[in-house]
Image: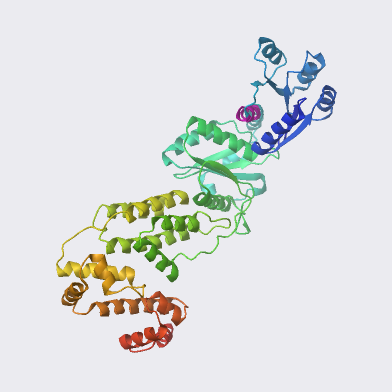
Amino acid sequence: MRMLNVLIYHQEEFEARGIQWVLEHQISQVAVEIVTDKQALLQQLEASPVNLLIMELEHQAENEKIEKILKDLGISWIGITMERTFEMASRALRWGASDLLLRPLNTSQLVRAVRSFIVSKRKAVFRENSTQQLRSVEEGEKDELEALNYSTLFLPSSYDLKELCFLALIVENKHDLKQLFERVQSFPFSFTFKPFLFNDIIFIVARKDGSTMWIEECNQFHSTWQQEQGSPLAIFINTNSVVEEQEATTINEAYLHTRQLTEIIFYLGFETVYERKSFGKWKVMDPFLTPYEQLEWIDMLQNQQAEKVKNWLSEEFLTLSSPYPNPTTVRVRLTSILAQIRRYMKARELHLTHWEKEYESLFEEIVETPVIYQIIQSMTNFCTRLLNTPSEKQGENPGTLKEKIERLIEVNYWNAQWGLDGAAKELNKHPAYISRAYSAAANRTFRQALNDYRINEAKKLLQESQLVIREIAKLTGFEYSSYFTNKFKNITGITPLAYRNVSKRG
């Protein structure tokens, strides 16, 4: 039963259209037609294959002809009524209704009733198929699927993949995998299949029979699992094993392709059923922050702009669409943001507190959490709380003050307007005190330390990017490119352009 043919018999066409819309949008592979008078109903039942009739009972007197046709043709039907009377219930029972729904109509109950009908039909098909398979085995015709084993998934094989479909089931809580496996084995799917249990997924090899409603059956299993267990579950249906334009030729390749399809969970999450006929290439994404993005993060953190951080993360990672970048690349990009957060923590002396453990936990989440939404939610919460936390107060000996000043240089070097006064304000000290204390501890002046750091950052950009000299000067805290060039030559002995050329030659 590939397409479910539903006939709605209702004198109120507007209400019938509403029922039709609900069924067509919530149940796949369903064809719904409407009739509004008794004569058209009788003609439709006799002329067309109808799997399910939905009929309102208010305007229907006893009609032996309708009752006879329903019984003779074995057509299941669902009644709709607003009369909560024994007479109406008795009529529905006598005519063999699958269900009786009361008005005002609850669309969820209607969809549930239709899906229940689908499941009952499939159970009948399943029992019939099981009986046929048992006869085949008794006659010595062993099904090829039964011969499959774990080694088949990893070694070359000669099966006709056009006759097979591949499914992968992934549950968010890995502890539920064994129970899920048992439920898969006992569920009345209409198709023949062989399941394989791994430590992270259940892989299924199923036989195509030309009539299987893959989405519908998997949705029904998904709903049953949610009702019984409640653990988030994703089901992948691979009806045509093609990955990056390469068609699978062995079960081993189909297994690997199906596994690759499951990586999309990172973006779309659990709680759903996916049918993928093919899997294209990942979109290219730079795994590291650009120099401009680094400065943007430094600025947001330094100015404690929690809302801006939240919006940046959301726009950068939660608006991605197909084709998606490789999840591994996204995870690397997220860790490059963590590096900026780490610098901020050090500058404000938060890395020596409980924030260190939270930072480490966040890093583990980025590496291991299966869904990007959960990662971004954790990062947003962490940054919001971090940016609302004051700096830790420590001792004021010159050695410690030197470390504080150098951490401030690290997060403020890009700002051409920042200097000794900015550091003094940040540390709540007089500029003259900061200058004397730092010079005594570091054996160089504050200005020398700031310029040295800026030139070192400029060297990195000259080596790793194609940015022009003017942009590099701006990114490293020099307002004018001419001043930057002079300062660079004074410190390194050569101009920025000459340094870039020497670096390229190795």
- Residue 290 visible in the shown view: no
Give coordinates of residue 190: x percent, y percent.
64, 33
Give coordinates of residue 315: x percent, y percent.
50, 57
- Residue range of the region highlighted in magenta in the rendering: 107-119
Q: Which of 209 and 2 is in front in this view?
A: 2
Left or right, residue 266 beside residue 493: right
Left or right, residue 400 beside residue 497: left
Q: Which of 230 and 206 is in front in this view?
A: 230
* Above or below, comparing residue 15 to residue 339 in the picture: above
Please name the residue shown 78% across and 19% down the image. 72
Q: Is 473 one of the magenta-colored residues?
A: no
Q: Is 115 one of the magenta-colored residues?
A: yes
Q: Which of 473 and 113 is in front in this view?
A: 473
Q: Nearer the viewer, residue 386 or 177?
A: 386
Give coordinates of residue 217: x percent, y percent.
62, 36
Please name the residue shown 52% across and 41% down the image. 271
* Above or below, comparing residue 406 to residue 122 in the picture: below
- Residue 76 visible in the shown view: yes
* Above or below, comparing residue 220 to residue 294 in the picture: above
Q: Which residue lies furthest to the left in this view?
A: 397
Give coordinates of residue 50: x percent, y percent.
76, 29
Q: What kind of secondary structure does the magenta stretch mostly adopt?
A: helix
Q: Residue furthest top?
A: 86
* Above or below, comparing residue 46 to residue 342 in the picture: above
Left or right, residue 322 beside residue 316: right
- Which quadrant is home to the C terminus? bottom left
- Which quadrant is home to the N terminus? top right
Indicate the quadrant where residue 121 lies: top right
